[in-house]
Image: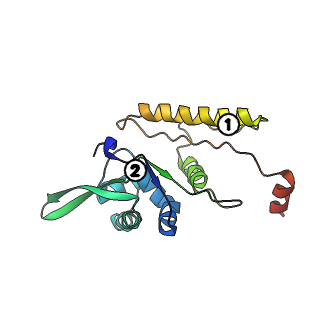
Amino acid sequence: MPTDDLPETFHVTTDEQLRAVSNLTRHRIMAALRFEPATITQIADRVGLAKGSSSYHIRLLERAGLVKVVRTRKVRGVTERYYAMAARSIELPDPGAGGPDVLMRHAVADLEASPVDGERHVRMAHLRLTEEQFAQLGARLEALADEFQELSDPSLPDASLVFSLFHPAPREQAEGNAK
């Protein structure tokens, strides 16, 4: 299924969808389906799961509308289903103050699981910016991510880009949460 046929964004709106996307295994399954459809067996191989576990997680993702069957074929009397993402990107609701940021938790877990001897670029910078500079930097980061996403080639190895630009909690609030 060409990615041109996919809607641009899937907006997570229900509790069922949020639970489905909040699970790290299902996050990794969705990443495996990012560029091309796959069968349960192919997904299990790519993610390192048993076929039964892969099937279970795909059913939950399908029920939540996050993945869908895009093609079927008969193989030795059995119907083989190919699953794909329901959209190019998934937009999560704002978790609200103090709520867990699911994407960042998944990104950290993926970073921790990545090969230590592989090339990685990780950096944290503390900045002092005007609101205009803050907005400008956010727009530039998003444009850069969009630019490289357009250059993305499914035949090449995966690379993940995660960024987060935010105003930290005021010192008093952060100290109160640490107690």
Q: Earlier in the sequence, mark 2 or mark 1?
A: 2
Provide residue 15's location: percent of width, then percent of height: 52, 68
Provide residue 151's location: percent of width, then percent of height: 42, 30
Query: Is residue 8 shown left or right of residue 5?
Result: right
Q: Secondary structure at mark 2?
A: loop
Provide residue 130's location: percent of width, then percent of height: 77, 34
Residue drawn at the location 31% of the way across and 59% of the way down: 40
Query: Is residue 136 shown left or right of residue 176?
Result: left
Amino acid type assigned to the residue bearing label 2 in the image: Ala
Disc 1 designates what residue? Answer: 135
Vertical position of residue 42 compared to residue 167: above or below: below
Disc 2 designates what residue? Answer: 87
Amino acid type assigned to the residue bearing label 1 in the image: Ala
Residue drawn at the location 40% of the way across and 63% of the way down: 61
Vertical position of residue 94 compared to residue 56: above or below: above
Judging depth in this view, the residue of 41 and 134 nearest the camera is: 134
Query: Is residue 100 shown left or right of residue 128?
Result: left
Q: Are marks 2 and 1 in contact (CB under 8 Å)?
A: no
Residue 41 location, quadrant: bottom left
Residue drawn at the location 50% of the way across and 62% of the way down: 13
Instruction: Locate the C terminus and report the quarter of the image it occupies.
Output: bottom right
Query: Is residue 46 shown left or right of residue 90?
Result: left
Provide residue 157's location: percent of width, then percent of height: 41, 38
Vertical position of residue 140 compared to residue 68: above or below: above
